[in-house]
Amino acid sequence: MENELMEALITRFPELEGKVKISAPLRVSVDWLPQETFLKVITWLHDEKKLTHGHNVIGTDEGDNLGFIYMISGEDQVIVILRTTAPKQAPRIPSLSGLYKCFILFERELCDLFGADVTGLPPGPRYPLPDNWPKDQWPLRKEWKPEKFDRQTMIYQGDSTPETAGAPAGNPASPGPATEGAAEVNAKTEALLQTVELDEEARAAAAFVNQPLPGEAASDNAPETAAKHPNSENLITVPIGPQHPSLDEPSTFTITLEGEKVEGAVIGIGYNHRGLEKACESRSYVQDLYIIERVCGICSHAHTTAYCMCVEQLAGVTVPPRAEYIRLIVGEMERLHSHLLWLGVAGHEIGFDTLFMMSWRDRERVLDILTVLGGNRINYGINCLGGVRRDIDEGLAQEIHKTLDFLEAEIKYYLKLAETDSTLAARLAGVGVLSKEDCLLYGAAGPVARAAGISDDVRQIEPYGAYRDIPVRVITDEHADVFGRTLVRIKEMLESIRLIREALARLPEGPITVRVPRRIPAGEAIIRVEAPRGEDLHYLRSNGTDMPDRVRVRAPTECNWHGMQHMLEGGYLSDVPITIAAIDPCYSCTDRAISLRGHNSLSGQVLDWQQLRKYSLDWYRQRGIDPSGIDLADISAHTDGKE
């Protein structure tokens, strides 16, 4: 498949000779292209080769230029990686949201984090940076240093600021790059924009970002529906969030209603930002593992698995088979944990609190096993570069089998309940509909896509680790609504139980880790794994040092947000909570992209025992507490002054 696609590209575009290669199985990589050629190639791939699924858009700092990496695929699941650049002093790039609706959030990141001027992108609120973030500060440019930015005053200190390195997006500087003048680049970009026009779907996407398209009247933070609806005088707007009892994490949903029916919806995300991607650039590969594990509490093992596989691929090391089997076992236990948690949340959202209590009771059995194995209920710390940290002995294996026997009976009961309870089916069926065609259009992932009949599971499409030995039976459904997503998740739990049992039965002997060099050879890796919520895609670029040059984490929730407006509109206000919950949104996964400074002078330091002891005693004294009763001598004697 890869060969045929590569040959077709070169045949259609002879200038790509020598610039196209098969970088890995199911990967066709195209070298950096001028914007003119890039736009022609990606449009041809979309229209002629039907590569209509967008996976990711990644920004990079290439010195004098900004780099933009696009990942798309079609039904054969071959991911084509396309690259283009724009000069930092005039960083204009055409939006591809007219072709790929799921690129809207990704392109917003290019604007906020790199200062790109994505022309043609539907206007809207900022993402992922806060509204009061200075518009001339782009944290993922290499010259931007977090220690020089005062988060309280929003002022960047120092001589070398991003403002001197390039003009703010939308206001290009006059000198232009050394290779091509800014005015010439802008003229070419304007011409290119004529080839990618926004269609009706792109116009609908503008409502998603709470802003009108160019040439239309702006609204006062209200959906366009209110102004355009024939019965606009009967519409009311209901704001939900950012703090609301039904929301676990801050977000806003502005719902426009005619009576009880939802006529418009605006989603606002990006309230809790963290410095994960920027922080990874200034820490070692080992230190970054702990950062990546904290992208999400529920999917921490999936994220670290993808990250470790990136580093291991670049380092050229082979993980021991036993470690790969343990990764599978923990990954499927994590899926059980996630789906049981979701089932309880879904029950609570529709008033079925008995289901909430039962599923969360069962979830505790999974967390008990993970606690024994890793020491934590979440962020288990199992993965390490080159393998895993913890082994599974015979005693633990027996406990896992007992837990699986108990869970299997409970999950079969939940499945019977879902399939036979008419009240439950009536409450979920026809709610939050996202058809197969719309899932493909908006780039839906995981159970959301599989509930619409799309057999999209990375464990089967691109088997990794022990999944190469133990094939996955992909669970799909045709309901394309909340009911279908419920059935998919319940059945996936039964499949996870089967996979864990088989992995335990076939667990090979041998070591659980191999050594990975501290310095990783220069290169790039793109790894995707199947997290509980869907495809989790990691990009890592190394530069030959002990710290990565670029890390990009694209969690599945980022893909599933794009279809939310479509799922809400046409439904009822009472269905809004369960419709939102049905994608199992992880706000933590999408809020990961700005750098936070420490609040004290010890931030970032590694303390030995004596320094930590002194700091602790001083901390109590500063608060008027006498620490004399705290005797740490015994502990200090055992540490011998070591870290």
Image (tube, rainbow, N blue to C red):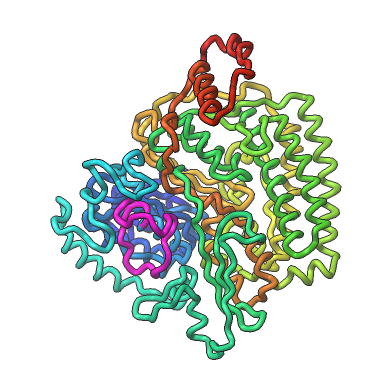
Q: Compare residues 412 and 380 and report the one nearer the observer.
A: 380
Task: Report the residue at 61% width, 43% height from top.
Answer: 297
**Could you tell whether 297 is left or right of 522 in the image?**
right
Q: Compare residues 108 and 234 and report the one nearer the observer.
A: 234
Residue 295 vs 168, above or below: the answer is above
Q: Residue 72 location in percent, x, y?
A: 45, 57
**Residue 133 among magenta residues:** yes
**Could you tell whether 299 is left or right of 82 in the image?**
right
Q: Residue 389 location in percent, x, y?
A: 61, 26
Task: Report the residue at 76% width, 45% height from top.
Answer: 363
SS assignment for the magenta stretch, majority: loop
**Residue 157 among magenta residues:** no
Task: Report the residue at 58% width, 63% height from top.
Answer: 241
Residue 401 in view (yes/no) = yes
Q: Residue 2 location in percent, x, y?
A: 45, 51
Q: Compare residues 426 and 225 and report the one nearer the observer.
A: 225
Which of the 4 image quadrants contains residue 629?
A: top right
Q: How many marks?
A: 0
Q: Compare residues 544 and 253 and report the one nearer the observer.
A: 253
Extreme residue toward the front, this view: 624
**Could you tell whether 353 is left or right of 461 in the image?**
right
Residue 438 in view (yes/no) = no
Q: Residue 410 location in percent, x, y?
A: 84, 49
- What is the span of residues highlighted in magenta in the rendered image? 112-138
Residue 148 vs 626, above or below: the answer is below
